[in-house]
Amino acid sequence: MVLLFRVALNCSLYRLFFKAGLVRGCHIMAQRCLKFLKYTMCVANFLCFLCGVAVLGFGVYMLMKFRMVALLPSLASVNIANMLLISGIVITCVSFLGFLGALKENRCLLLMYFLLLFLLMLVELTAACLLLWYGEQLSGVITEDLKKSLEVAKGSTGNQTLSEWDLLQKNFNCCGVTNVTDWEPKVPTSCCLGECSIPKPHYKEKGCLVTMTTLFEDNFLTTGISVIVLCMIEVLGMCFAMTLFCHISRSGLGYKM
């Protein structure tokens, strides 16, 4: 009887210690996974921060060199330079919040990071839908702006509009809105293929509107895929942030800095 009691007791103790060891092992594994998650978030957000700084610097360069405000006055507030500046600032701020929140295990920063990523995803999807919906109207606005700015450039020499047209025609290898006849009778040197001083110079055949439209259409699929990939990365970042947030809440670390 005593022997049976000892065997039962040993079995109970064995099961108890086995369960305790299993729980402890699971706890250690969970801690390691969360630590891996924490440092993965830190590294990813640090890389995003560096990318944001690079985009911001490129935006400043574009703002000083290639504003193109005189060519498209109706879209002056949404030109490439301004968009790059805004994107760079947003990327650096959001990635800094994510890096600091993960490193310090701060619930407040992680929650702000989650909400900002969610808002960014909504803005990106809204902008993509608006671009698809109002694509034709946008093309009409660009056409009218280019025609008006070309008339301004033809009216005088040495103005900002003419300088921006020269820059556009050199970079896109185009001439005029539709073709070289838009500039007649005085064609700028940026329309010439080679020397303009010869009696019958050769001019660039394509208009800038067609070139810009073709460039947009050629990169349309790439842009769409980029938006989808970016949204997936943002969803993954939100999942990581919320997982870390819930762990910190359960462990009672609070809002430590």
Image: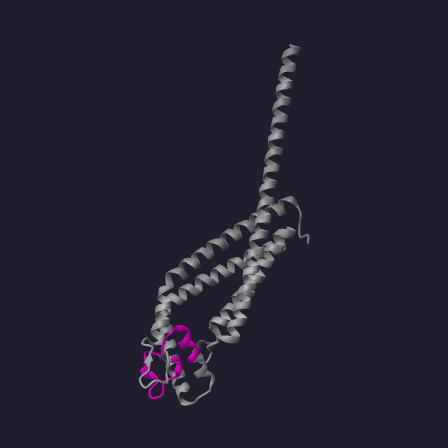
* Location of residue 133 with respect to 15 vertically, above or below: below
Per the image, is 85 magenta?
no
* Residue furthest out toward the right: 257
**In the picture shown, does residue 18 fall above or below 190?**
above
164 sits to left or right of 241? left
Using the rendered view, name the quadrant where residue 150 is placed.
bottom left
Quadrant in which the C terminus appears: bottom right
Q: Quadrant of the N terminus?
A: top right
Q: Is residue 174 inside the magenta stretch?
A: yes
User: Residue 155: where, in percent of width, then height?
Assistant: 40, 89
- Please tell me which residue is depicted at 44% across the width and 63% down the height of the picture: 126
> Extreme front residue here?
198
Q: Is residue 109 above or below residue 135?
A: above
Count the marks: how many?
A: 0
Q: Residue at x 61, y 19 (%)?
A: 11
Q: Which residue is at the front of the view, 249 or 213?
A: 213
Return the x and y of residue 72 as percentages of the image width and height.
Answer: 43, 78
Q: How is the image coloured?
A: one colour
Q: What residue range appears in magenta?
A: 165-190
Q: Position of residue 169 (x, y in %)?
A: 40, 77
Q: Nearer the viewer, residue 117 or 41?
A: 41
Image location (x, y in percent) of residue 229 = 44, 55
The residue drawn where x is 48% and y is 76% is: 67
In front of the other: 105 or 206 = 206
